[in-house]
Image (tube, coloured by chain):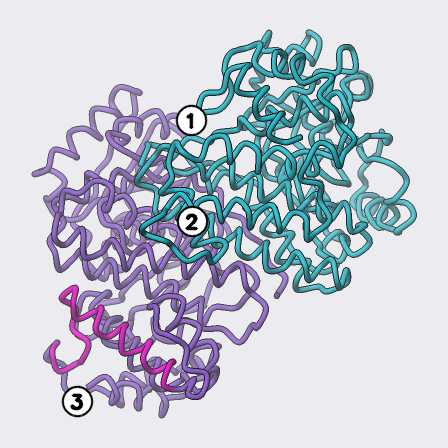
Chain colours: A purple, B cyan
Amino acid sequence: MRNFVFDNKTKIIFGKDQEQVVGKEVAPYGKKLLLHYGGGSIKETGLYDKVIESLKAQGIEVFELGGVKPNPRVSLVREGVSLCKEHDIDFILSVGGGSVIDSAKAIAAGVKYDGDVWDFYTGKASISESLPTGVVLTIPAAGSESSAGTVITNEDGLYKRATGHISLRPQFAILNPELTYTLPAYQTAAGVTDMMSHIFERYFTNEQNVELTDRLSEATLRTIIHNAPVVLEEPSNYDARAEIMWAGTLAHNDLLDTGRLGDWGSHDIEHELSGIYDITHGAGLAIIFPAWMKYVYQQDVNRFAQFANRVWGVEIDLNNLEKTALAGIEKLEQFFQSIGMPTTLREANIDDKHFEEMAKKATENGPLGNFVKLHAEDVHQIYKLAQ
Amino acid sequence: MRNFVFDNKTKIIFGKDQEQVVGKEVAPYGKKLLLHYGGGSIKETGLYDKVIESLKAQGIEVFELGGVKPNPRVSLVREGVSLCKEHDIDFILSVGGGSVIDSAKAIAAGVKYDGDVWDFYTGKASISESLPTGVVLTIPAAGSESSAGTVITNEDGLYKRATGHISLRPQFAILNPELTYTLPAYQTAAGVTDMMSHIFERYFTNEQNVELTDRLSEATLRTIIHNAPVVLEEPSNYDARAEIMWAGTLAHNDLLDTGRLGDWGSHDIEHELSGIYDITHGAGLAIIFPAWMKYVYQQDVNRFAQFANRVWGVEIDLNNLEKTALAGIEKLEQFFQSIGMPTTLREANIDDKHFEEMAKKATENGPLGNFVKLHAEDVHQIYKLAQ
């Protein structure tokens, strides 16, 4: 087991009606707030009104910036930074899913920096402090509500890049499973894929002695796998929505990192896809992950056999561990298909036109991943396997 | 699933040599520190010198209060409170196990209160703030290193009582598994029992829809069960010690509470035992828990059958779930015996002399537990079952 620091201070407020406490949670941080959100759905559902009411009750002055899109753009972030600087904003509240939260984090870091916020994503600058943020989560998927990371797309060249800093962990995250009842099936399934992928990125490691972290990861995966079909069948099943929502946070709050080094190659490979094609991140991961697994499983057949057995209930064939390992990957593909995700690029109408370019761009700062180091040629092969 | 708040801000610093960072971790909180510890073992092992060196390097002035005993006494806590008030101490550092940490927390709360610190344990007063504390953990067991609770014994009548407040969560906890190599087998086993018990208290609930929390609990239990014999066999096995140490923290950091109400009846029943007989807390729990389980399992045979199956690998007998449930309890008893714990009061030389008195004292503030509400007569029966 590797040495680690686990330092996650995000307060999780979970359950029915909890969006009503948002004003009280913000109050200790100041009086001027930027409300950041996506399209109009939070107005249609009445969530917007509830949040505003709770904030006003605490005498908080609200500035607004809506319009965050999936694969959030740096241009809107820059707008948010200016707005915050201009009005001396104290706190940024995201109401939405991962894109909104990631955009809010970028603004929060940008406010404390004199240069262009994109510098954080190219490695030209490092985040050292940020405005405090909070979240009312509406889409369980990205885990950004308690993570220290943010992913932003630069329209100028369609670069999608990630960065992080501990100051980006939100001060609080309000998780009310009822707010996810109206999520369309496709988005629900993409969210499920995203959270499972966050666990895969951590699970496939070369660290041999991480039993507790392994078992916690398997526990979370099994819960997701069990409840995903339920929420697709019964969108208003509170308990199943609750399991999925809490699992999405735990999948990415770094508990499942403890004692080992994550991989993150597949996320980088997917980021090129969704940077160019604007495909839903979760759908991109459903395509990339099985291909990545097929490409790398021989690095540690035992680990993939354990995955097959403990997560998917595949019986271990001691005489053919490779077969066991492959059966696990097949189960995963079948699962993604069963929840309506594409598992090939073809299904997403993506041909091989940009394979070489994407592989090159993904690896321009060096090889990807930790479990197996992937160079441009490896990434190209993975795109091919995903066809 | 019940609504919940999960708010655990303790920074976990885990791994080899990490006690060396203690000075840097304390520095942001002030310049005057109370070093709280137990007997002389930290001096024998050299840990004391390392900690002092790290603190001095940051220019921190160190005041000392050693002598914490298992089942820590309120008299020493009162001494600590006076010492802190007299010298305007900023921070309390515990170097030791649960008793030292609980004692430090009591001091931390007492410093901010004008009355007698015992008031917090009788319910006469409530904690609202505390001095910040930190921990260098040497005994994985109590989970106090990131919990919000503290248990103190009042020698005047041998009352052992618990209280808690979020301000009691330590700011940081340093967990170096190497520091546990010298723990004697009995204390190691008692610690294992204690952490398992913390999970049992949370696992046996009337809440039906807590799948993720159940599975995380089972994952943690299996890890403990797998690694306990290893550390008893090979006290210096780093990886096994690491699994046990991290499991002990997770067992009690409230993650495994999420979405449900804990029971805590067995802890209260055991507190009477160790209040009067000064038996090791873990050993007391190894005696009480199987008896409690036998007394209450019919409240939810399915849950006990799930426990038997998922934690102990007992095959589910669908035609006789009660048999499955009982087989799980038997496995637990056998496990406790296998690691050298007593599972009957007789083995601990405790006769029935105080049964009635303890049952009465345990329930003087009302019935115990939540899974099944236990009155004095029930508690008496559980002591009898534990004979």
Question: Badge 1 sits on which subunit?
Answer: A
Place of residue B171 in the rendered image (x, y in percent of width and height, measured from the top left): 62, 38
Q: Which mark is residue A28?
A: 1
Q: Amino acid at mark 2?
A: Thr
Q: Neighbour class for label 2 at 10 Å: few (<14), some, many (≥20)?
A: many
Which span of residues is magenta-colored?
A323-347
Mark 3 and mark 2: Cα distance apart in space:
59 Å
Q: Nearer the viewer, residue B345 or A280?
A: B345
Question: Badge 2 sits on which subunit?
Answer: B
Q: Is residue A109 left or right of residue B144?
A: left
Q: Nearer the viewer, mark 3 or mark 2?
A: 2
The verdict on residue A345 being magenta is: yes
Q: Is disc 3 placed on a helix, strand or loop?
A: helix
Q: Which mark is residue A353?
A: 3
The image shows residue B119, relative to residue A149, as above or below, that is above
* Residue ID for mark 2: B324
Mark 3 and mark 1: Cα distance apart in space:
52 Å
Q: Amino acid at mark 1?
A: Pro
Place of residue B277 in the rendered image (x, y in percent of width and height, measured from the top left): 77, 24
Of the 4 image quadrants, the one containing the C terminus of chain A is: bottom left
Q: Which residue is pictured at 31% across the width and 91% down the height? A: A381
Place of residue B223 in the rendered image (x, y in percent of width and height, measured from the top left): 56, 57
Q: Nearer the viewer, residue B132 or B220?
A: B220
